Amino acid sequence: MPRLLVINPNSNTTVTANIDRALAPWRVTGVTIDCMTNDAGPDTISSDEDAQRAGRDVCAIAAKARADAILVACFSDPGVDMLRGQTARPVFGIQECAILTALARAPRYGIIALSERAVPRHRARIEKLGLTERFAGELGLSDYSALAVGQSDAAYAETRTAADRLRDLGAGAVVLGCAGFGPRRAALEADLGMPVIDPVLAGAAIAVGALLG
């Protein structure tokens, strides 16, 4: 039975538990999905330094784990490129997977980040991946944590406003720029009437498909 390791690069175990619950439907495929928390990481990946440190932690965790594929569940894709250079196993990052999923749903996509500080980091990743041509833009919220963005009504109101602005900029699909957004994805999609991409679910779909294909 193939095994997928999903690594939460931050140290928030509630975020990891939410990820684990969200991935339950994929377990019926026969793929074993293990979710792990980076206990040494920050509570939220907020800065470039956080992302770099978390990337090193991700590589250390993956090196010791028994898995056939690895999904890094942080929107900055920390450690993904480094890990791809260290292992022959398939390695997936949720930012890359979410954007590819959005491109299959709409001509142009936009991203909502936890804060404006995250936008340059995400943009650098988009440019490195060569995915700028159909990029409508990215907007940051008021610096919420990875946990709060999936629970706070104030965060949801800001997310809805940002999504409307992205639609005005030409986005036909909205990518949620953090694993913590997951609990609000379905409500946001229903309110907007347009595709809203949960990066964790997008990453799992691609990773499980690779393992079964």
Image (spheres, rainbow, N blue to C red):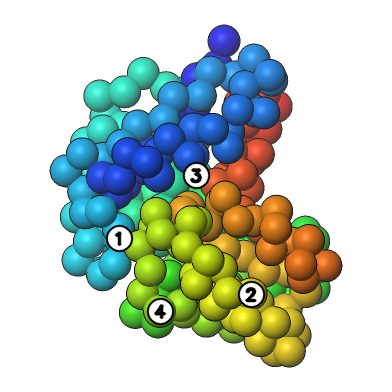
Could you tell me which secondary element the residue under label 3 belongs to? strand
Amino acid at dot 4: Ser
Q: Which residue is mark 2?
A: 160
Counting residues from the N terminus, which is met first, the one under dot 3 or under dot 1? 1
Left or right: 199 with respect to 17?
Answer: right
Amino acid at dot 3: Phe
Left or right: 54 with respect to 172?
Answer: left
Counting residues from the N terminus, which is met first, the one under dot 2 or under dot 3? 3
Q: Which residue is mark 4?
A: 142
Q: Residue furthest right?
A: 193
Label 1 near label 3: C-beta < 8 Å?
A: no
Counting residues from the N terminus, which is met first, the one under dot 1 or under dot 2? 1
Label 3 near label 2: C-beta < 8 Å?
A: no
Task: Tell me residue 120's x, y (percent).
Answer: 39, 80
Q: How many C-alpha atoms fall within 10 Å of the one at disc 3: few (<14), some, or many (≥20)?
A: many
Q: How many C-alpha atoms fall within 10 Å of the one at disc 4: few (<14), some, or many (≥20)?
A: some
Q: Which residue is mark 1?
A: 45
Marks 1, 2: nearer the viewer: 2
Could you tell me which secondary element the residue under label 4 belongs to? loop
Marks 1, 4: nearer the viewer: 4
Amino acid at dot 1: Ile
Give the alpha-carbon distance from disc 1 to disc 2, as whole Å. Answer: 22 Å
Q: Which residue is mark 3?
A: 92
Counting residues from the N terminus, which is met first, the one under dot 4 or under dot 2? 4
